[in-house]
Amino acid sequence: MLPGTIHITTAPQYLADRSAPDEQHYVFAYTITIRNNGTQRVRLLGRRWVITDANGKITEVQGSGVVGEQPRIAPGEQYTYTSGVSLETPVGVMEGSYTMALDDGREFQAPIDAFRLALPNLIN
C-alpha cells in the first residue's frame, strides 16, 4: 500500500455537559473518518495516540482496533467512529497512527496528523 492511500480526517468537539472546569476536567469527543483511497481492502488492527495537554503532560494510548472494532474498509469506502478523551487543561493536542493490514497480511502505519482539542472561542 502506498503512502497517502489512507486518508484520515478528524473533527474534535468540546463536551461542556461532561466537563468540570472547576476540577480541571475537560472532556472532548473526536470523530474520525478513515477513507481507503487504495486498490485493496484494509483492516484496522490497532491504534496509538499521543495526547499532550497545555501543561506538557503526555499520555500515550495504545490498543487493539477502535471503539471495540477492527473494521475492514474496502477500496473507495470509509469508516467513521466517535470516541473521547479527557484533559486536565482546556487545550491540548492529539496525534498518532493506526496499524493497518492488507488482506495478504502485510501491515503498515497510517499516520494521524496532530489536531487541537480546545474550548470554543479560547484560541482564535
Image (cartoon, grey):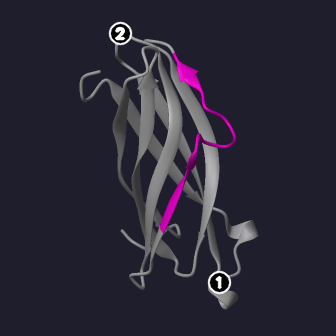
Residue at image x 36%, y 18%? 37
Q: Amino acid at mark 1?
A: Pro
Horizontal placement of 73 versus 69: left or right? left
Q: Which residues are drawn in magenta?
A: 60-73
Q: Where is residue 46 shown, x and y percent of the image?
A: 52, 42
According to the picture, the residue beneath numbered tag 2 turns out to be 39
Distance (Cα) linking label 2 and label 1: 46 Å
Q: Does the magenta portion include 71?
A: yes
Circle 2 sits in a helix, a strand or a loop, which is it? loop
Q: Where is residue 83 shown, x and y percent of the image?
A: 63, 50
Q: Amino acid at mark 2?
A: Thr
According to the picture, the residue beneath numbered tag 1 turns out to be 21
Comparing marks 2 and 1, which lies closer to the viewer? Answer: 2
Q: Does the magenta portion include 59?
A: no
Horizontal placement of 79 versus 67: left or right? left
Quadrant assignment for the C terminus = bottom left
Q: Where is residue 70 shown, x and y percent of the image?
A: 61, 32
Answer few, some or many: residues within 10 Å of disc 2's Cα (few below 14, many 20 plus, some between 14 and 19).
few
Residue at image x 44%, y 41%? 98
- Residue extending farthest to the right is 17
Circle 1 sits in a helix, a strand or a loop, which is it? helix
Q: Where is residue 77 shown, x and y percent of the image?
A: 50, 16
- Mark 2 vs mark 1: which is more N-terminal? 1
Residue at image x 44%, y 26%? 101
Answer few, some or many: residues within 10 Å of disc 1's Cα (few below 14, many 20 plus, some between 14 and 19).
few
- Nearer-the-camera pick, 62 or 8: 62
